[in-house]
Image (spheres, rainbow, N blue to C red):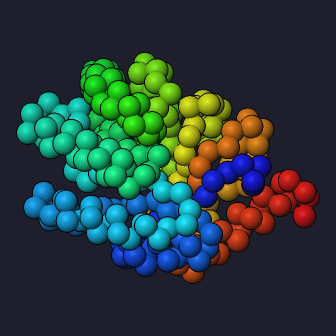
Amino acid sequence: MKNKIEKFISSTVEFHDIFKAVEVANELNMGLEISRFGKLKDLDEYFDDTLNRYEDAIKDLEGPLTLHGFFSNLCPTSKDKGIKDVSIKRYYQSLEIASRLGAKTVVFHTCFNNLLKQKVYRENFFVSSVEFYNEIIPYFEERKITATIENVHEPNGELIRNIIAAVNSPYLKATIDIGHLNLHSLVPARDWIKDYGIMLHHMHFHNNFGDEDAHGSLKKGTMDVKKVLLSLKEMQIYPQITFEIFDKEELIESIQYLEELQNEIEYGI
């Protein structure tokens, strides 16, 4: 299993310094996921300059690259045209960044608000999401870049799975974030993995104690990482894994811990 899973670190590890993040990725023999692109307040005025700077940084990256698409305050399914227009612009900018930098996976949030319990909200959100992804995914298909939808506040995998199934493109897949799952879902990771099946393309690994989105070491939290790995092996699914851990020492600890768990599962050592 361990030889089939491509691993990445998050660019957050060095306080969003993309040049230092590339150095750490190379040092650890990992790929890199760009988790934040520049500063949001400068995004429109300096988009091209920022893209040039990131292009300069990743030319030294020895491993593969993925991208976390824009997500802050966005909602491409919003009824407010202004919010929707800006959100859609950011999603297309995410595609442009991935295309320029050579990232083959882009991770998006659903922007789903689980605090709204009305059935009509969920139904409208699903329909609007399918319409949106039907519009944007052909552009990903042209560039052979896979878009994935990540769980944040979702209580189970049903909404994301149904969106992906309805769009029915090989370039729209799922991301499971086990830290978010530990915070917001009572459904075990095993069931999320089984529910997604071959839709699962990417995962974010970090841990917490169920009280905050700490993005901490895999050894510091209540998510049982070994059970996650066992479920992947049982299903024979080998998604990419990004260690979305902000502290460098905890990142290194987590990489070593995952290696130990994989050896234990594979070889009993």
Asked if residue 195 can be seen in this view, the reply is: yes
Residue 12 locus on image (x, y percent): 41, 69
- Above or below residue 253? Residue 97 is above
145 and 192: which one is in front?
145
Q: Looking at the picture, how far across and down is residue 40, in whole percent?
A: 20, 62
Left or right: residue 27 compared with residue 52: right
Residue occupying the point 59% across, 54% down: 241
Q: Tally the numbered discs.
A: 0
The quadrant holding residue 151 is top left
State whether residue 117 appears in this view.
no
Foreground: 237 or 154? 237
186 w.r.t. 179: above or below:
above
Residue placed at 59% from the left, 49% from the top?
240
Q: Residue at x 33, y 66 (%)?
A: 54
Q: Which quarter of the picture shows residue 140?
A: top left
Q: Is residue 232 left or right of residue 154?
A: right
Towards the viewer: 78 or 17: 17
User: Which residue does the image show at 49% across and 67% down from the upper left?
Assistant: 61
Q: Position of residue 131 (x, y in %)?
A: 28, 22
Between residues 105 and 164, which one lies in front from this camera angle?
105
Q: Is residue 79 left or right of residue 238?
A: left
State whether residue 240 is above or below residue 118: below
Q: Quadrant of the C terminus?
A: bottom right
